[in-house]
Structures are given as structure tokens and as C-alpha cells.
Image: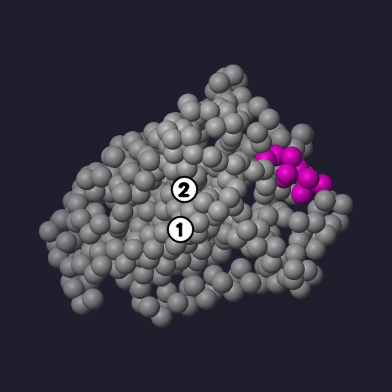
Amino acid sequence: MTSRRLLPWAIVALTIAVWAVPLQLAPFYDQGGITDIPTYRAAYEQIADGQVPYADFSLEYPPLAAGLFWLAGILPGQYEVGFSILMCACLCATALGVLALARTLGLDQRRQLLAAGAVAVSPLLLGNLVETRFDLALAALLAWTLWAGAAGRFRLAWGLLAAATLLKLIPLALVPAMLIWQRHRASARSAWAGLAGCLLVVAVVVAPFAIASPSGTWDLVQYHVDRPLQIESTGAAYLLGLHALADIPITVENSFGSQGLDGTGPAVIAGISTAVLVGLLCAIAWSLWIGLRRARPPGDARLFVAAEAATLVALLVAGKVLSPQFLVWLLPVVFLVAGRYGPAAFAIAAAAMLLTLAYFPDRYWDLVALEPVPITLLVLRDTALIALLAACWPRPSIAGQPLGRILRSPGADSQGAERAVAARYLAD
């Protein structure tokens, strides 16, 4: 019991130590000039001057992100330092959320330590991008959203999902699995009511900005719709690979704050990628639906987490934009995937992060220059993400296989407990 109570403190201490020493002092993790901090600082300065996002200046992120940029600016010291402190706190919150989710799934202490510890040391796998982008704030919200959902605290889960959506739009992709999961554990009516409450919160927060500037607020969505095929996406990696092997012509353009591929071919592949993404999200939701029909606790919760993990990986694999910081989205779930492929998901996720670090940021401009070495690294990374999607897929066997050692009270009658669970859910 003492070690159980000390584990969260140990995880926080490890997180802070990794952040404060190797991430700050090791030359290997020097991010150089590739950073989004100037964009965040500019937004803070405009807000501090009394300007309203979307009405007085353009912002590609939802309103809660603007609040985060403002918060970093009012902290004492330089903006970069305040932002780094905020992201360190978010990493701590993510690691603690993963630890709480691991306990809810019934993992033994060794598995809890492995999952939360992997999150704590993730800056060593991803580099300084974790402190120059705000995606760790999203990861923290996602970790606690999934914990609340797995624990059956659905009102809290939908509230946190609303907050995550107001930070970045991508958490909307988690809605189908959340609906199916709550229907399984509670009822369809409560699931739809939860979604309605979530959307209401989002609408209430966005409404003042939409009233102040309808066109400026809509530009938040239009910006992402209009983006071309980004150079690091899976579709772009396919074209880059063909360029390296067969010297097919490729044109790189600078737009939307990043580098993308210009031309008819990349535009067609971007459209195909979007269609594939929609198909993958539907297939994941269907697999979860089928798997939950006979799943029992805690296996059903493991299946739910796998479905959300597969959803997040699918966003990376089939999205037309795949910036390096998007791998931060995987931290809340990929180290908790159950079943026979769980260890593979753990290893592949770590490998994908290291492959990203191998070309970003040091070789990124070589990639833009279409050099063969960074192209090879990118193709390997995107291939690893495809393999990760397969490892995370919510197959029904996940719900029926043990994940670590299930925690039990010393005097518990396990057979009686299993009969009680069966009696509770056989009526479904």
C-alpha cells in the first residue's frame, strides 16, 4: 500500500527530473529555430493589448488555446520559460492520468510503472518539441477524459472532452467510441445526452467569438480544410519515396506555417487520405461495437481504450497533416493497449517517436530539400505508425485476455466476483 501511494510522487519526480536536466542541458535536444513559440507569444501580446481573437487577429486554434497562450505570458519571467513550465505541468498531469487509467484497467503495479514511466521520459524520445508546442496540454486533457470514461464518470468525461475540443479540434474524432462505450456501460439515452452537453459547452464558449466575427471564427475551420498535403504526412511520404527511388518531380511549397506538396497529384492524395480517414474511423467504431457485445469488465474498458488509441493513431496515419508534435497525442493511450499486441504497440510507439527525433529538427530542412536520408527516416516513421494502428486495433480478443495481473483484495472470492459481473451484464 505504501508503494501504491508513493508511485504518483515518484512519477512526478521522474517527469520533472527529465524535463529539468537532459531536456534543458543536453546539446542533443537543442531545438534550434524550429519553434511555434513566436506564434504563441504574438497571440498573447495581441490579447494583452485588448484585441479579440478571430475578430481583431487571426488564430488557427480554438479559444481555449488562446487562453493558454495568455496564461504563459502572465507568468513571471520570459515567455519561453513560462510556457515551458506550463508544458512540464501538463506532462506531469498526463503521466498521472495514464497512471490513474492503468489502475482503472486493473493493471498491476509493474505495468502501471511502465506506462506512466514511459510518459514521464517521453521528452527523451520526442525532443524539445514538447516544450515549444502546446500539444501536451491536449494530452493531459485526453488522459483524464479517458480515465473518466473508463471509470464510468461520464459527465466528467464529456466535460473534459469539450475542454479538449476547445483546445484543438481533433478530440471530436473520439466521440463515436465514447458514444458506443457509454451506451454499453450505461444507456444510449445517457450517451446522446452526454454528447449534447459536450457540444453545448463548446457552443457556449465559441458563441461570443462567432457573434463578434462570424467570418473570422469560421476561418478557424477553413484554415485546416484548405491546408495542402503536408510534407511529413503518410501520403507525402509515399510521394517522397517515389521521388527518392524514381526521381518523380515534386514541388515543395511554404504555406499555412509549414511545408506542403504542391500539384495535382498531392491534391488527389490529400482527398484520398481524407476518405481513408473517414473509413478508418467508421471501422474502428464498428469493431468496438462488435467487441463490446460480449465484453465484461475490466476487459470492456481495455477494448474502449484500444479503440481510442486506434482513433488517435488513425488521425496521424490518414491525416493530410502530420506535424512531429502530433505524436504527443499518443501518450495517453499507446502504452496501455491490451492483448497479445500490447507489447508491440508499446515498442512501435517508442520507435516512431525516436524515428521522428532522428530527422526533426536537425534534418528537417534536409527533408524539405528532398535529401534521401531524411526521406528514408520519414518513410520508416510513417510505416511504423501504420504498424502501430494495426497493433492498437480494438479486436474482440483484447477484452478476453488478461492485461498484467488483475488487482484483487487479499481476501476476495474471485469466482464469486466473476459470477456477480456475469449476472450484471448477461442481460445486455
The mark nearer the N terminus, 1 or 2, is 2
- Left or right, 378 with respect to 229, comes to left
**Residue at point 18% right, 73% down?**
426
Residue 95 percent coordinates (x, y): 47, 42
Look at label 2 and name its amino acid: Gly
Viewer-proximal residue, 65 or 28?
28
Question: Residue 331 is drawn in which quadrant?
Answer: top left
Reply yes or no: does residue 37 show up in magenta.
yes
- Left or right, 126 with respect to 48, comes to left
**Residue at point 36% right, 69% down?**
180
Residue 345 percent coordinates (x, y): 32, 42
Question: Residue 279 is drawn in which quadrant?
Answer: bottom left
SS state under label 1? helix
385, above or below 300, in the image: above
Viewer-proximal residue, 292 or 9?
292
SS state under label 2? helix
Q: Give the Cα distance between marks 1 and 2.
A: 9 Å
**Residue at point 61% right, 54% down?**
227
Residue 375: which disc?
none
Disc 1 + disc 2, Cβ < 8 Å? yes
Residue 295 shows in the view: yes
Q: Looking at the image, which residue sits at the far left?
A: 415
Tell me which segment is drawn in magenta: 36-45
Q: Looking at the image, which residue sits at the far bottom?
A: 189
Viewer-proximal residue, 72 or 277?
277
Identify residue for label 1: 272
Identify residue for label 2: 235
Look at label 1 and name its amino acid: Ile
Viewer-proximal residue, 77 or 35?
35
Residue 303 percent coordinates (x, y): 30, 58
